């Protein structure tokens, strides 16, 4: 009897130990999934101020209309609580919901297709067991016809979705491969930085070569461009991803600043360095910063420049607007002031268009946090924004690029509409005419 009790006791202890080990493994898996969700920047799209984390409802402006993000909490009624791991993987990597309907590629499943099975499992564990369920459904997306027919995405996916998981390059280092996996997959850099074709798919032959997001411009981040002027090094790029600032004078704004705040700055230094290693080859690591250092002073330095009435009378509209609105922070000649960034050699002035400068003037940079730069959308009109942008780009930045008043008007309105909308209307019109002609032909044939 005593021997039997000892056997049962030993078995019980083994079960308890196994259960504790399994619980520890599950906790570690959830923790890893939480980190992967940060690296994937999931909260940026699936969370909105005033609602719980991952409860959805965030409006995503697309050229085809407004798309609302879904509730991805483990709610069984409003979220993904009834998803199996296989269904979760299908949504994440193929854009197919549990009910079989298609997701729009505003959800970057085209990049998440690169994710490994292990990372998908960790993300599933986190969203099912590490996130609070929210039973309030998110606002539904209602795109205009024919884009509201989600079935059409099956054809789009057949044409453009590459389902091949990430394949490491055996000739490259472990760090390089980790960076490639992050850039191509979780961080989905190509979603913004790769130009798109007329069907809104990424152009496979032009990876990371820069693309307009409708308003902000995501620049070319290929190695050839990063090694040009202004010159980048791996360390500069790693610093930029972690803080939004780099030694060559670059400062982040718009969607990139949001990605840095919510994702890159919260990643491990090793992962950030790996991304920089992938984007820049080893030989690009050598080189000095070309940007002007931000002036530092023990006390506040006054604005430096000639403000005599005779000088002011000869100023252009852009120069006057700059002195009235910008010089107190960036100095009269754009050389920076009291720790605020110089503009003279700022990398944003080397871009192929003036959209980012105009958007920074319109929206500001972090104005909602009481720091950074305020926006002037409510105090300056389109003509003034264009004049100010051109002065900063051309007079301070020595760029040949400019912007028109009409373009500023389009930026203020959220960007220009996609030609797909017009093409679809024309296509439907042609189809309607063809159907009508067929009906007329059939009626006449029957009468005969």
Image (spheres, helix red, strand yellow):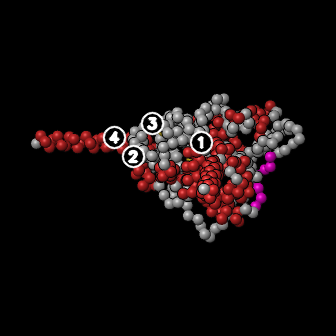
State which tag comes first along the sequence, 4 or 1: 1
Q: Position of residue 140 (x, y in %)?
A: 47, 36
Between 294 and 15, which is closer to the camera in this rendering? 15
- Tag 2's secondary structure? loop
Q: Is residue 377 visible?
A: yes
- Tag 4's secondary structure? helix
Residue 56: quarter of image = top right
Whole-number angstrom distance, CA of label 3 to CA of label 1: 27 Å
Mark 4 sits on what residue? 429
Disc 4 packing (10 Å; few <14; some 14–19; many ≥20): few
Mark 3 sits on what residue? 142
Q: Is residue 29 visible?
A: no
Magenta stretch, residue numbers: 287-294
State which tag comes first along the sequence, 4 or 2: 2
State which tag comes first along the sequence, 3 or 4: 3
Q: Which mark is residue 131?
A: 1
State which tag comes first along the sequence, 1 or 2: 1
């Amino acid at each position: 009897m005593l021997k039997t009790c000892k056997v049962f006791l030993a078995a019980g202890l083994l079960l308890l130990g196994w259960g504790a080990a399994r619980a520890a493994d599950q906790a570690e898996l959830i923790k890893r999934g939480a980190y992967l969700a940060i690296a994937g920047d999931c909260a940026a799209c699936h969370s909105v101020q005033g609602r719980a984390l991952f409860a959805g409802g965030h409006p995503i402006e697309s050229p085809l209309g407004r798309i609302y993000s879904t509730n991805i909490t483990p709610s069984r009624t409003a979220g993904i609580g009834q998803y199996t791991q296989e269904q979760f993987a299908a949504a994440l990597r193929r854009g197919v919901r549990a009910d079989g309907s298609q997701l729009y590629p505003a959800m970057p499943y085209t990049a998440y297709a690169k994710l490994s099975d292990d990372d998908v499992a960790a993300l599933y564990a986190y969203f099912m067991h590490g996130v609070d369920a929210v039973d309030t459904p998110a606002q539904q997306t209602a795109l205009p016809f024919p884009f509201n027919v989600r079935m059409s995405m099956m054809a789009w996916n057949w044409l453009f979705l590459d389902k091949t998981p990430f394949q490491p390059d055996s000739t490259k280092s472990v760090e390089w491969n980790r960076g490639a996996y992050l850039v191509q997959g979780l961080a989905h850099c190509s979603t913004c930085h790769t130009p798109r074709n007329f069907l809104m798919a990424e152009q496979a032959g032009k990876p990371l070569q820069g693309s307009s997001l409708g308003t902000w411009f995501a620049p070319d981040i290929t190695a050839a461009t990063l090694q040009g002027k202004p010159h980048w090094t791996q360390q500069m790029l790693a610093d930029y991803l972690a803080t939004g600032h780099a030694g060559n004078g670059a400062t982040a704004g718009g969607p990139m600043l949001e990605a840095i705040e919510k994702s890159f700055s919260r990643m491990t230094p090793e992962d950030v360095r790996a991304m920089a290693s992938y984007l820049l080859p080893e030989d690009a690591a050598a080189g000095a910063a070309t940007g002007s250092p931000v002036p530092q002073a023990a006390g506040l330095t006054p604005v430096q420049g000639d403000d005599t009435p005779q000088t002011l009378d000869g100023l252009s509209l852009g120069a006057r607007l700059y002195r009235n609105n910008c010089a107190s922070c960036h100095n009269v000649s754009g050389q920076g002031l009291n720790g605020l960034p110089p503009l003279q050699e700022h990398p944003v002035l080397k871009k192929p268009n003036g959209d980012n400068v105009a958007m920074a003037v319109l929206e500001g940079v972090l104005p909602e946090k009481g720091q950074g730069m305020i926006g002037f959308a409510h105090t300056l009109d389109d003509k003034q924004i264009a004049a100010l942008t051109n002065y900063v780009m051309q007079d301070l930045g020595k760029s040949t690029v400019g912007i028109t008043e009409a373009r500023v008007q389009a930026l203020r309105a959220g960007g220009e509409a996609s030609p797909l909308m017009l093409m679809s209307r024309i296509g439907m019109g042609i189809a309607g005419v063809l159907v009508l002609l067929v009906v007329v032909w059939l009626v006449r044939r029957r009468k005969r």
